[in-house]
């Protein structure tokens, strides 16, 4: 059964801040309060767009956030279904050395200041060669995920392809200097990785990459900036939990 959005208490999102997080916060509250019950389907993208007054890109980002919390799943031809009413975070490792966590968070802080802008520029400036390169790097990540790899190299090369598509050599050199160390999983010890949780985490990363790529190839600079910001910010928030624990 699909929940009727008209009967749910939702509000148009403000124009400041992250639109997708405003939407995700409201939907998360509806699920955890039981107003969208476990086993029922979340309203369609179209009805959510109308109710919140936002684009499909924003709704998809919000749903991706709910997936990262383990609240919902999306299946082709079925829609998005509520799995549980309490959140669980997919985290790639059981534990991480505190110094390593600090290094990861410093790099993510730097990336958050630069990469959303890079994604926006890539959306506005990419050419056909860049398009082919970004699509190939995304396909390589998908294949690595299928093969149960940690996809560290493929993750780096996807983001590097976006940096090159900005046509600004300093974005390219930034990525070349940091190399694979820009990817948080490159710093994790194999013995600390939880295979099942890591699988869920990489599935989320793959979907987020797909939305970033879709926005860039559509030449939607605003959506490219937003999807890249959410991708990196979710990683930062997740790794910050290791400090809290």
Image: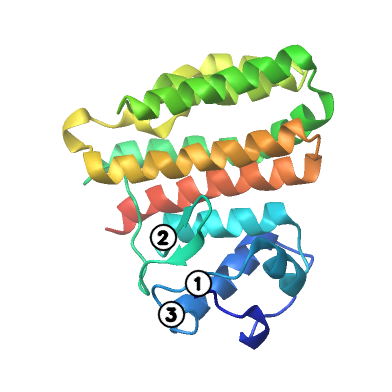
- Image location (x, y in percent) of residue 79: 53, 59
Which numbered disc flags the more N-terminal residue, 3 or 2? 3
Given contact means CB atoms under 8 Å apart, are the residues at marks 1 and 2 in contact?
A: yes
The residue positioned 41% from the left and 60% from the top of the image is 69
Quadrant of residue 191 within the rendered picture: top left
Identify the element where label 1 is drawn.
helix
Mark 1 crowd level (few <14, some 14–19, many ≥20, 10 Å Cα): many
The residue positioned 62% from the left and 54% from the top of the image is 60
Alpha carbon separation for disc pair 3 and 2: 16 Å
Alpha carbon separation for disc pair 3 and 1: 11 Å
What residue did someone put label 1 on? 28
The residue positioned 69% from the left and 48% from the top of the image is 226
Between marks 3 and 2 in the image, the one whose residue lies nearer the viewer:
3
**Quick one: which residue is furthest to the left in this view?**
191
Above or below: residue 222 compared with residue 134: below
Identify the element where label 3 is drawn.
loop
- Image location (x, y in percent) of residue 9: 63, 86
What residue did someone put label 2 on? 69
Mark 2 crowd level (few <14, some 14–19, many ≥20, 10 Å Cα): some
Given contact means CB atoms under 8 Å apart, are the residues at marks 3 and 2 in contact?
A: no
Quadrant of residue 228 within the rendered picture: top right
Residue 195 visible in image: yes
Above or below: residue 189 compared with residue 88: above
Quadrant where the C terminus lies?
bottom left
The residue positioned 49% from the left and 84% from the top of the image is 35
Alpha carbon separation for disc pair 1 and 2: 9 Å
Quadrant of residue 42 within the rendered picture: bottom right
Which numbered disc flags the more N-terminal residue, 1 or 2? 1
Residue 37: mark: 3
Colour mode? rainbow
Above or below: residue 180 compared with residue 41: above
């Amino acid at each position: 059964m699909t929940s009727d959005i008209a009967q749910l208490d939702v509000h148009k999102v403000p124009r400041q801040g992250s639109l997708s997080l405003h939407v995700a916060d409201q939907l998360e509250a509806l699920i955890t309060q039981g107003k969208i019950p476990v086993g029922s389907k979340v309203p369609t993208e179209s009805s959510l767009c109308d109710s919140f007054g936002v684009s499909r890109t924003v709704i998809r980002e919000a749903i991706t956030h709910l997936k990262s919390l383990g609240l919902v799943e999306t299946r082709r031809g079925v829609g998005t279904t509520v799995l549980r009413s309490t959140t669980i975070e997919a985290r790639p490792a059981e534990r991480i050395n505190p110094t390593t966590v600090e290094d990861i968070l410093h790099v993510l802080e730097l990336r958050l200041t630069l990469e959303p802008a890079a994604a926006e520029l890539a959306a506005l400036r990419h050419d056909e060669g860049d398009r082919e390169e970004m699509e190939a790097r995304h396909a390589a990540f998908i294949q690595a995920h299928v093969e149960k790899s940690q996809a560290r190299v493929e993750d780096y090369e996807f983001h590097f392809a976006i940096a090159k598509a900005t046509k600004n050599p300093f974005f390219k050199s930034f990525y070349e200097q940091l190399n694979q160390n820009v990817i948080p999983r490159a710093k994790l010890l194999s013995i600390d990785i939880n295979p099942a949780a890591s699988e869920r985490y990489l599935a989320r990363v793959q979907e987020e990459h797909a939305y970033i790529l879709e926005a860039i190839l559509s030449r939607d600079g605003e959506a490219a900036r937003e999807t890249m910001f959410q991708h990196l910010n979710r990683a930062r928030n997740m790794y910050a939990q290791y400090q809290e624990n």
